[in-house]
Amino acid sequence: MSEETFVAALGEWIEVLMHYSMRRFLRHARERGLSMSHLGAIFHTHRAGGRGVTEIGEHLGVSSAAASQMLDRMVQQDLVMRSEDPKDRRVKRIVLTEKGQRILEECIRARRSWLNEVAGVFSDDEKQTIASALMLLTERVSQLSDTNNAMREFNP
């Protein structure tokens, strides 16, 4: 198989995966009144632990003032809470509330629910073949990412 054919096949799969999994994810988020910015803030806060307003704004590509206004609304919705940074009381840390964590988990489950439907259309042998290929893909891409990250750290 040529590299071009392989890349095209990967691209087609990524488009299908993103379309169907993200459609459910976004529908679930909209039903809960969440915007893409809300989702970005929730995921960033979840991954990075407590974050400052400026850090969240930078991650979302918005000003600190815009991030602060959005986070104020999220506090009112009980999705996040602000707490004092133990090292610097002037700094407010943003952390997910139980409700914010629950909604995050619901959104992830909604996105992944499509995979159960996908699994249902394959035989056990096909599932084994696909799972092996996906594990190999994940392993190789992880190695590539580790190499790229190491190179960035070495050459700032």
Image (cartoon, grey):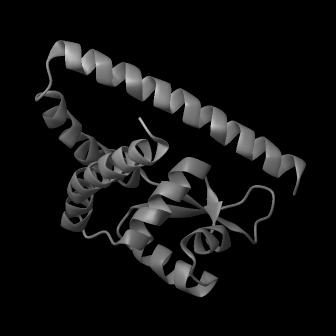
The relative height of residue 104 versus residue 138 in the rendered view (above or below) is below
**110 lies left or right of 132:** left
Question: Please, which residue is most extreme toward the left here?
Answer: 121
The relative height of residue 119 versus residue 64 in the rendered view (above or below) is above
Q: Residue at x 34, y 45 (%)?
A: 9
Quadrant of the image containing the N terminus: top left
Q: Residue at x 38, y 70 (%)?
A: 36
Between 78 and 155, which is closer to the camera in this rendering? 155
| Residue 32 at least partly seen | yes
**61 lies left or right of 123:** right
State the image coordinates of residue 91 (x, y, percent, origin top left). 72, 69
Q: Residue at x 88, y 47 (%)?
A: 154
The relative height of residue 56 versus residue 153 in the rendered view (above or below) is below
State the image coordinates of residue 120 (x, y, percent, origin top left). 11, 28
Question: Please, which residue is most extreme toward the front here?
Answer: 2
Quadrant of the image containing the C terminus: bottom right
